């Protein structure tokens, strides 16, 4: 009998999980920027302030282009080139900078 009662409780819990799933607002652009270790090294090598790299990702969002390499996007802001992934995994609010450099 105890096993049957446990099964009934389990079924009741399962039915609660099948309810409506709340919808989240659609995120149309990143609002936060994080950096890979490689991107940090490249920014240091080219003496690129992190703020400039983040501003390029957030500010030039509309002019981004698909990157043919392993990261999702490329954006250019003047001589600055930034390669990044967005969304960062399942976090649609975050872009992850993979690498950055300046074109001469």
Image (cartoon, helix red, strand yellow):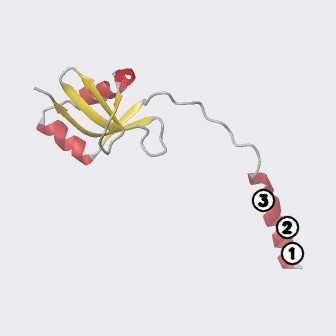
18 relative to 88 in the view: left or right:
right
Left or right, residue 16 beside residue 79: right
Label pair 3/2, CB-CB below 8 angstroms: no
Q: Quadrant of residue 75?
A: top left
Mark 1: give few (<14), some (14-19) or many (20+) Cα within 10 Å: few
- Where, by quadrant of the figure, is residue 44 drawn? top left
Labelled disc at residue 4: 1
Q: Considering only vertical position in the picture, is 39 above or below 104? A: below
**Cα distance between the residues tagged 3 and 2:** 9 Å
Secondary structure at numbered mark 3: helix
Q: Is 40 or 57 nearer to us in this picture?
A: 57
Q: Earlier in the sequence, mark 1 or mark 3?
A: 1
Residue 35, by quadrant, is: top left
Determine the secondary structure under disc 2.
helix
Q: Could you say which is closer to the camera, residue 73 or residue 5? A: 73
- Residue at the farthest right position: 1
73 or 60, which is in the foreground? 73
Residue 17 screen position, x and y as percent: 74, 53
- The residue where tag 3 is placed is 13
Question: Dots 2 and 1: beta carbons under 8 Å?
Answer: yes
Q: Which mark is residue 8?
A: 2
Rendered residue at 86%/75% (across/down): 4
Whole-angstrom CA distance, mark 2 to mark 1, is: 6 Å
Secondary structure state at the residue bearing disc 1 = helix
What's the residue at 15%, 29% (across, down)?
Answer: 102
């Amino acid at each position: 009998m105890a096993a049957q009662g446990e099964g009934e409780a389990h079924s009741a819990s399962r039915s609660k999980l099948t309810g409506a799933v709340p919808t989240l607002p659609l995120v149309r652009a990143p609002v936060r920027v994080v950096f890979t270790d490689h991107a940090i090294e490249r920014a240091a090598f080219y003496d690129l302030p992190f703020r400039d790299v983040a501003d390029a990702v957030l500010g030039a969002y509309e002019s981004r282009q698909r990157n043919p390499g392993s990261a999702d996007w490329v954006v250019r802001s003047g001589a600055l080139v930034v390669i990044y992934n967005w969304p960062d995994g399942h976090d649609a609010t975050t872009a992850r900078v993979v690498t950055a450099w300046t074109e001469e």
